[in-house]
Amino acid sequence: MSQINIRRTLLLLLFPGGVFLCFFFLAPLLFVLVESFTGLDGGVTLQRYISVLKDPQFRQVYFRTLKIGLIVTPLAVLISYPSAYVINNLSVGRKSALMSLVILPLMTSPVARTFAWIIILGRFGLINQSLRALRLIDEPLRIMYTEGAIVIGLLQLFMPLMVLTLVSALENIPDEVEEAALSLGSGRVGCFFRVIVPLSFDGLIMGVTLVFTGCITAYVTPAILGGSRVLTLSTLMRQQALVLMNWEAATVIAVVMIATTLVLYNSLRLIRPKNL
Amino acid sequence: MKKSKALVLILILMLVFLLGPFLVIILSSFGSEALMKFPPKGFSLKWYDKVFNIKMFRTTFWISLKVGLLATGTALLLGIPVAYTVVRFRFPGKSVIELLFSSPAIVPGLVIGFSLLRFFIYVSNIPIIVGLYLGHTAILLPYTVRVVSASLRNFDPAVEDAAISLGSSRLFSFLSVILPNIRGGVVAAFILAFITSFNNIPVSLFLTGPGVATLPIQMLVYMEYYFDPTIAALSSILIVITVFIVQTAEKLLGISQYV
């Protein structure tokens, strides 16, 4: 096929999808971005940003959101690494069976998944009823509408992502590598940290990026488990837009959310272990 | 380390944490009291009866189904050619194209929904259901492109070259040689995209309005007013359907490798 012909084919194949995304994805985002810098008189201004960023409530919510991500992500790594390691060493059939169970929280209706936690963490929920039966508490503990509840909900939602990326990273490490390390006198723990972790590091970073950005932008989990008492960036944005009808603030929060996600996405990728 | 008991224990605890809540919700959907308690008291099917008798759940179920099928179909039609181009050709600006088609999965859904709403209001008054369809198609495109690309990479390009060198047109060879060979990937893309659309809340949140909602949005609205096991019953139905779909898709297509 001639060069020109190929070029025409490429254009033809990419055109419909490309145009669709330009119209119904890029243009709206640009529109909001421009709007966020436009003053009432139509000129360029930072006024909207200044008033949102100065607001102590916004700052509190912003740092709380980051904090939740900073708690969930390491917990997910700690639990997922050993689990992924065990899953990866199973036979093909068992591995597939386990993976299909692990991905269930990602595939289930978010309302169903989160509602389950109300039944567990609520006033008359599983935890409070058990603690009372054991006579450890008199008054029910308040677990719902706390940061802790959000952390638990997000951990269930995003751990599957971490396990998935870690398992596919571990799959690429030949068994011989580990055997070699062990036969050369490496201890099992040493082998894990000095051989397995460095060799699956890209997967780890990928998982960390997905989980952390996921935590920062998640909506349903903080909406149900945190409510209006413990706001995160996304529930604050929804409140500003749909409850308080403060579109200016919502626009700024939207831009801040994208900016934070993009910075995390691009900076986490730069992390490399020293000895690789 | 291959068979350490401590590691297996961590895996089991993780599975309990990931899946236990689903068991809890299914058990409590059979309780007879209106107050959500665990363990539930009594046994009753009345909450299931109630789910089917609430008209808004039926209406929004059909809207979710319609939007999900249409958006998934469109995302496949637009996404398969893109996946084919990205896998089969090298061309300048390829990385930009790949970035463009993966970014709706990176940008927060809430922001996509919000900006689409602002955009639709500004540009014209697009009917709610059309707005939902367009927004969902945009967020599904990364899934269809990624999953179909993955299955195209496993297909030997020499087979296509052979068909073309024997005089078949590129379009015909795609339809008759490639498509049948990647149909597993296409079906996996369909399932993943449809589930993503059917469960979506962040994008739909801003694009639904009075009278037109999707099922998950309607469930959230219901929860704001009533706190009884009706949502547990509806959730249980959705969980059982999801488990069935995921298990079947795993056996037939190995869907977990595409997630």
Image (cartoon, coloured by chain):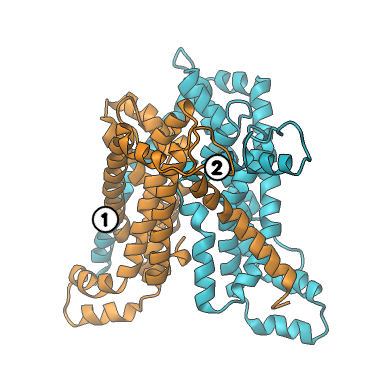
Q: In this view, does A253 lie to the left or right of B12?
A: left
Q: Which chain carries label 1?
A: B
Q: Name the residue under label 2.
A: B40
Q: Which chain is cyan?
A: A
The residue lying at 29 percent from left, 74 percent from top is B181
Left or right of A232 in this view: A1:
left
Q: Earlier in the sequence, mark 1 or mark 2?
A: 2
Q: Mark 1 points at which residue?
A: B77
Q: Nearer the viewer, mark 1 or mark 2?
A: 2
Instruction: Give the colour of chain B.
Output: orange
Residue type beneath disc 1: Leu
Q: Nearer the viewer, residue B108 or B99?
A: B108
- Residue B117 at x, y = what percent? 37, 29
In percent of the image, x 73 and y 85: which residue is there?
A180
Q: Quadrant of residue B214?
A: top left
| Relative to A251, A7 lies left or right | left
Q: Find numbered disc 1 in the image and state the secondary structure of the residue it sits on.
A: helix
Determine whether A146 is above or below B66 in the image: above
Pointer 2 chain: B
Image x and y of residue B12, in percent: 64, 64
Q: Distance between the residues labelled 1 and 2?
A: 47 Å
In-front residue for pair A144/B200: A144
Q: Nearer the viewer, residue B24 or B4?
A: B24
Residue under the image location 51 percent in, 48 percent down? B27
Considering every residue shown, the one lying at the far front of the view is B42
